[in-house]
Image: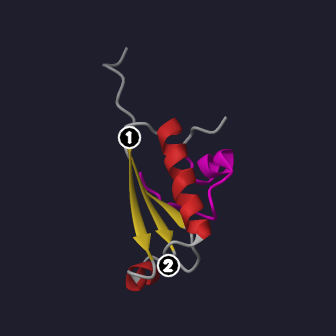
Amino acid sequence: MSGPAAKPEAVKLTIYVAGDAVNSAQAIVNLGAICREHLPDRHTIEIVDVFRHPDRALSDGVFLTPTLIRVAPLPQRRIVGTLRDTERVLRALDLGLAS
């Protein structure tokens, strides 16, 4: 028998948005809800506005918004869209949480 159960690895997410565009706002709200429900106390979210940081978006290969990237744990995973379909988002990010 092994020691105490290991704490699940923290999930680091970066979402690229286009200012206050409707799709971007929806994606941020949906991501927040997904994280509160499925990753409580074990996630960080960085929001990058491509209008304010276009060089960062280009260097990270982001050409469409909203784009969500699971930065950690590796390997990176990406999904584009408003993140409305929770099960699809969980599968795309390979978090092992989808039912």
Residue identifier under label 2: 61
N-term mark: 2 or 1: 1
The front one of 66 and 26 is 26
The front one of 20 and 68 is 20
Q: In this view, does 10 lie above or below 57?
A: above
Write down the region rendered in magenta.
72-94
Distance in Å between CA atoms under marks 2 and 1:
26 Å
Q: As shown in the figure, which amino acid type bears the numbered disc 2?
A: Gly
Give the colour scheme of this rendering. Answer: secondary structure
Q: Rate crowding at label 2 as few (under 14), some (14 to 19) or many (20 or more) other CA atoms within 10 Å.
A: few
Residue for point 41% across, 64% down: 47
Mark 2 or mark 1, whichever is nearer to me: 1
* SS under mark 1: loop
Residue for point 42% across, 84% down: 54
Residue identifier under label 1: 42
Q: In this view, does 87 lie above or below 84?
A: above
> Which residue ends up furthest to the left in the rendered image?
3
Q: As shown in the figure, which amino acid type bears the numbered disc 1?
A: Arg
x then y, percent, for residue 67: 55, 67
